[in-house]
Image (cartoon, grey):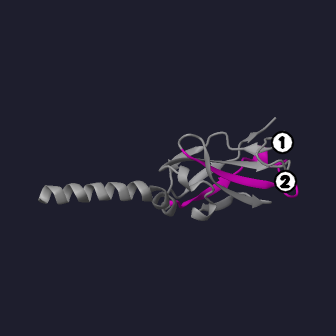
Amino acid sequence: MKRLYLLFFLLLSALTLYFLKDPLLASAFDVSGEIGMPEHVSKNYFKPNNMLFIIVKNEKDVPVAVKEVINPIFPLKFTLTKKDIILQGLITARIKIGCVLNRSGNVGKMSPGDVYSSAPVKTFLFSKNIFLTLDSVYK
């Protein structure tokens, strides 16, 4: 009889975790850090209405969270929380974070002069003190 109760409890726990996985991962989402820009890139980056996009992708490179900052000043401290999630059902525990400084106004499309982080940071969805560098100019 004890085995039957244990089996029932394990089955119920597994089903609960299966159906609550997405909200649990989303509630744990809390990433913060700083974005810098090397001097050789920062000389010509400023233009009114620049948009900085901090993009979080899951393990399969699908964007799951985005934060935008208008006219950023570097170094820039950032925090992404569950409010920044755009696809809750696709969040994974391991994520990649990158950023793009969009100078053209065409969202989602890189244009000449846009600046981006060439090496996205691979981390977990509850990481702190991440440092991203806007180090490459799109040509």
Residue 116 image position (x, y, % from top left): 72, 44
Residue 19 image position (x, y, % from top left): 43, 57
Up-down relation of residue 41 to residue 69 (above or below): above
Please tell me the numbered disc located at residue 16.
none
Q: Residue furthest left?
A: 1
Residue interval drawn in magenta: 29-58
Please tell me which residue lies in front, 106 or 133: 106
Query: In the figure, residue 65 lies in which quadrant?
Result: bottom right
Examine the structure image and report whether residue 40 is included in the region drawn in magenta.
Answer: yes
Please tell me which residue lies in front, 27 or 139: 27
Q: Kindly identify the residue that appears in the image at 54 percent across and 53 percent down.
A: 89
- Mark yes or no: residue 137 visible: yes
Query: What is the quadrant of the C terminus in the image?
Result: top right
Please tell me the numbered disc located at residue 113.
1
Q: Residue furthest right?
A: 48
Q: Is residue 114 left or right of residue 30?
A: right
